[in-house]
Amino acid sequence: MRRPMPALMPVSGRRGALADLGESSIGRWVTAVLIAFAVVVASPAIGALGAPKDPVPVNDLTGGGHGGVSSAHWVNTWVSMPQLTEPHNMPPAPFTQDGLVLADATLRQTVQVSVGGRQARLRFSNAFGGAALPITKVAVALPAGGQAGVTGIEPGTSRPVTFSGRPSVTIPVGAQAVSDPLNFTLAPRSNLTVTIYLAQGQASSDITSHPGSRTSSHLLAGDHVTDQDLTGATRTDHWYFLSGVEVWSPPQTAGVVVVGDSLTDGRGSTTNGNDRWPNQLFDRLQASPSTRHIAVLNQAAGGNRVLNDGLGPNVLARLDRDLLAQSGVKWLLLFEGVNDIGTAAATAEAQEKVAADLIAAYEQIITRAHAHQIPVYGGTITPFGGNNPGYDDPEGLRENTRQAVNRWIRTGGRFDAVIDFDRAVRDPANPRQILPAYDTGDHLHFNPAGYKAIADAVPARLFLGSPTPRGLE
């Protein structure tokens, strides 16, 4: 927002304050005022001091120094899908009490960003909280050794985070809060530590989290936001409240949102290893100068479904929040549907219905994304043969549904591109099952090698240029 010009002092009678200066003095005075105003407008925001303005990009953020404020933009570099926390995923005792969570407690979390930047801001979510969320203090730092899931931070790297210039924020029920811009350099693929302190805690047993973090967080009683290490902290492998990190980026930087379930959330990947398939896709994109500006944003949750609520709201309900409300998004990659098929009854009638409903839902998702000029890439549903008891029924009715849905994904002509994950991971000798080398053992989820195969199946060319979504040419 531009600041208003300083008001000029009015002339009083025949000779006022300006008249007394003389004609040449007036010109010099006005010039000085204009120069000072221009400096104020052009100065970058000093996030550490709580300046709430968007930063003005320096030359290396404008693609050659030819742009102004509009040349650069905010882009999410990391996200986590907010969920209502189940009882067994709440913070461990004594940090959860009856109707009160994390009172007088410090929470230290690490996240791995995708693209980097020299200025950043954080998003915190109270989407599912049963009461207002009062966050007393927040700081960011580089984790000790640059590692994920550690309790320590690198000395001298801690920086306070502010909200409209204030050190604390109270987030209403259902809302989110975005921090002020912060001058803090993040390298691509680097880990970031975010430490928060809640003096009062959240007065509810309903809180917002992302249980499938595959990353360790740490809890300690008292205010230890700036401590170099949280000695004696309690470990918990979940994220709480933090839902996004954004960076101020050159105009060509953009994000691809991946909407999915546990196969994208990374069940079977390595805790603190960041080897889910979206991480491995980003690693691949980073290796090429033509795609290293692409952020990969993982909006997935274990047990999530397209049609009905499960672990987290269904895709049709969360699309606006998890796709359209994210900063700098240019593409959607949809890889979800196995839980809809697997939880529908193993009867011909139920499976015919879920196939038709899934296809209709995919069309709705495509239509809604296209309305925002976002192309949608569809991933085929991977095999689950042998997941029994579970999704694989003896008559193969759910397998028939998977094949029918995949056939529509491949040939329906509605997706802007199709990524054949099924073909990439299935066992050629038994196409109903995933390749044993990729299997965690439950015949549904993948190990890191399997996730690499999924990542490698995504063509990098899908993120080159600015394709017009199908049907909008």
Image (tube, helix red, strand yellow):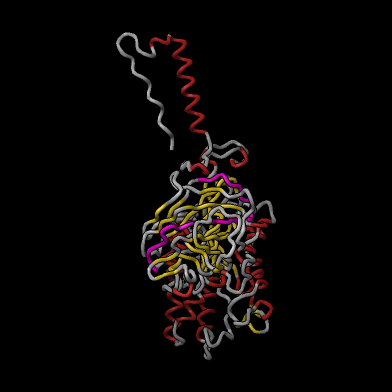
Give the image location of residue 358, x and y in percent: 45, 73
Quadrant of the image containing the N terminus: top left
Q: Is residue 197 magenta?
A: yes
Q: Nearer the viewer, residue 373 or 102?
A: 102
Q: Is residue 247 above or below residue 148?
A: above
Q: Quick check: can you spot residue 415?
A: no
Give the image location of residue 259, x and y in percent: 51, 65
Identified at 58% across, 76% down, the residue is 382
Q: Residue furthest bottom?
A: 394
Identified at 62% across, 62% down, the residue is 150
- Judge left or right: residue 460 versus residue 318: right
Q: Is residue 192 above or below residue 418?
A: above
Q: Nearer the viewer, residue 401 or 38?
A: 38
Give the image location of residue 339, x and y in percent: 49, 77
Q: Magenta residues, as a range?
A: 181-205
Q: Which corner quadrant of the image does residue 145 belong to?
A: bottom right
Give the image location of residue 69, x and y in percent: 52, 39
Q: Quick check: can you spot residue 389?
A: yes
Identified at 45% across, 19% down, the residue is 30
Q: Is residue 71 above or below residue 77?
A: above
Q: Nearer the viewer, residue 14 or 362?
A: 14
Q: Which corner quadrant of the image does residue 307 belong to?
A: bottom left
Q: Residue furthest left?
A: 13
Q: Is residue 460 magenta?
A: no
